[in-house]
Image: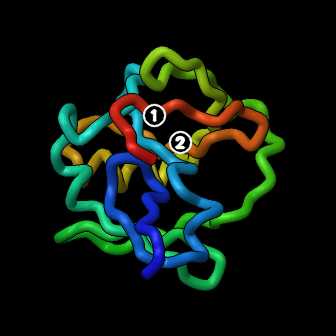
Amino acid sequence: MSTPYQPIAECGVIDDARAADYHRRWLVANDAGQWLTRELSPRLADVTVELRLGYLVIRAPGMLRLDVPLDVIEDDDSVRYQMLVGEQTVDVVDEGELAAAWLSNHLGIPARLLKLHPDTAPVRWPGASA
């Protein structure tokens, strides 16, 4: 039995060993730059993910699927930001307007999909056992 992984923090888990390198690589933030948890946005629990052909495939009830490339080199500093996850400042990269529109539509609030920058220190996720 493999370990369940959660590519997008607070969203669905997948039981696929290939996902180990992508565990909590992404997170969702509101338009104020606050990390969204299920407590703040319960509809995150409805978001499911899978790995397929080099993409993170994101789905939710009533929504078309969204495909996000897994391995993109983050070299555009204009979409790189810093934000707080718990008490830790982390570097993140915005995944763009399409992902933001998809999440905002599903969650019912303005939201952004952010990817942890590969140069950021390991994240100490509040309340996480993994």
- Estimate the x, y position of residue 39 in percent, counting from the top left: 18, 35
Q: Which residue is drawn at 47% across and 77% down?
A: 2
At label 1, counting other C-alpha atoms closer than 10 Å, the crowd grade (few under 14, some 14-19, many 20 or more) is some
Contact, CB < 8 Å: mark 1 with mark 2? no
* Residue toward you, 126 or 60: 126
Q: What element carries label 2?
A: strand
Residue at image location 33% in from the left, 47% down from the top? 10
**Left or right of residue 94: residue 36:** left
Q: Residues within 10 Å of mark 2 (few under 14, many from 20)?
A: many
Name the quarter where the N terminus is drawn: bottom left
Q: Does residue 86 lie above or below 92 as drawn?
A: above
Tell which circle, 1 or 2, labels the residue nearer the N-terminal end: 2
Query: In terms of depth relative to the viewer, which is nearer, 33 or 9?
Result: 9
In this image, 8 relative to 39: left or right?
A: right
The residue lying furthest to the front in this view is 1
Q: In which quarter of the image is residue 6?
A: bottom left
Question: Is residue 81 positioned above or below 76 on the image?
Answer: above
Query: Residue 16, how many percent across, how many down?
Result: 49, 78
Residue 119 shown left or right of residue 81 in the figure: right
**Place of residue 18 in the rendered image (x, y in percent of width and height, measured from the top left):** 60, 76
Q: Which amino acid does label 2 sit on?
A: Leu
- For badge 1, the amino acid type reads Trp
Q: Name the residue under label 2.
A: 114
Q: Name the residue under label 1.
A: 125
